[in-house]
Image: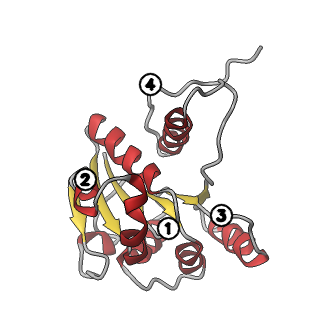
Amino acid sequence: MKLIIGISGATGGIYAVRLLEKLRRLEVETHLVISQGARLTLPETSLTVPEVEQLAAVVHRDDNLAAPIASGSFKTDGMIIAPCSMRTLAAVAHGAPYNLLTRAADVTLKERRRLVLLARETPLTLAHLRNMASVTLMGGIIYPPLPVFYHPPRTVAELIDTTVARALDLLGLDDLGLKRWAGR
């Protein structure tokens, strides 16, 4: 399996870090692109940008529009943007890519591959909601990283891991650590 992982400038870079760690364990080939804004917010994860880049199989510069992931002929199984800023969401929603991250998302949609956006912003404006609806109508999946309490989490790490596992589930990757609701 081959996935593109995008990190944009919203808070929540820890989701991308956990995604990359899990995908490495699952032996998934990851192609990472980090936006300029994300380079500013990634330190909230306690990792440096180079440390995050080391988690990926391949790293692409955000200004390199000649990278393989900018073309539909480069086969992937999908893309996750975690976190997804409202600026990135807007570019994807309007088909107006301005960097490699948004171009790769645009390509993912046009090739009818899975695109999962962990949209990170609150409160939401009408523009945000319309952009989310637009991406959904194009086949993308809006998956805000909201906590799940079906199985009472004991730590913040458990909350993050559940969100990451559910995002991977949307791409057909079964994370054996995902607790599924079995009913009462």
Tell me the kind of residue under disc 3. Answer: Thr
Q: Position of residue 129 (x, y in %)?
A: 74, 70
Which of pointers 1 and 2 lies earlier in the amino acid sequence? 2
Tell me which residue sits at (30%, 69%) in the image: 69
* Label 4 SS: loop
- Indicate the quadrant where residue 52 lies: bottom left
Relative horizontal placement of residue 163, taking residue 53 as reference (left or right)? right
Left or right: 120, with 39 as reference point: right
Q: Position of residue 183 (x, y in %)?
A: 74, 18
Q: Tell me the residue at 66%/36% (across/down).
A: 148
N-terminal label among 3 and 4: 3
Query: Which numbered disc flags the more N-terminal residue, 3 or 1?
Result: 1
Q: Is residue 37 visible?
A: yes
CA distance for labels 1 and 2: 22 Å
**Which residue bears the numbered disc 4?**
176
Q: Earlier in the sequence, mark 2 or mark 4?
A: 2
Which label number is shown at residue 56? Answer: 2
Read off the residue under disc 1: 109
Please state which of the two labelled residues, at mark 3 or mark 4, is closer to the viewer.
4
State the residue at coordinates (25%, 58%): 53
Answer few, some or many: residues within 10 Å of disc 4's Cα (few below 14, many 20 plus, some between 14 and 19).
Answer: few
Q: Whole-Å distance between the Cαs marked 3 and 1?
A: 10 Å
Q: Which amino acid does the dot numbered 2 rest on?
A: Ala
Q: Alpha carbon of mark 3 to alpha carbon of mark 2: how far?
A: 27 Å
**What kind of colouring is applied to the model shown?**
secondary structure
Label 3 sits on residue: 136
Label 2 sits on a secondary structure element that is loop
The quarter of the rendered structure image containing the C terminus is top right
Label 2 packing within 10 angstroms: few (<14), some (14-19), many (20+): many
Say which element carries label 1. Answer: helix
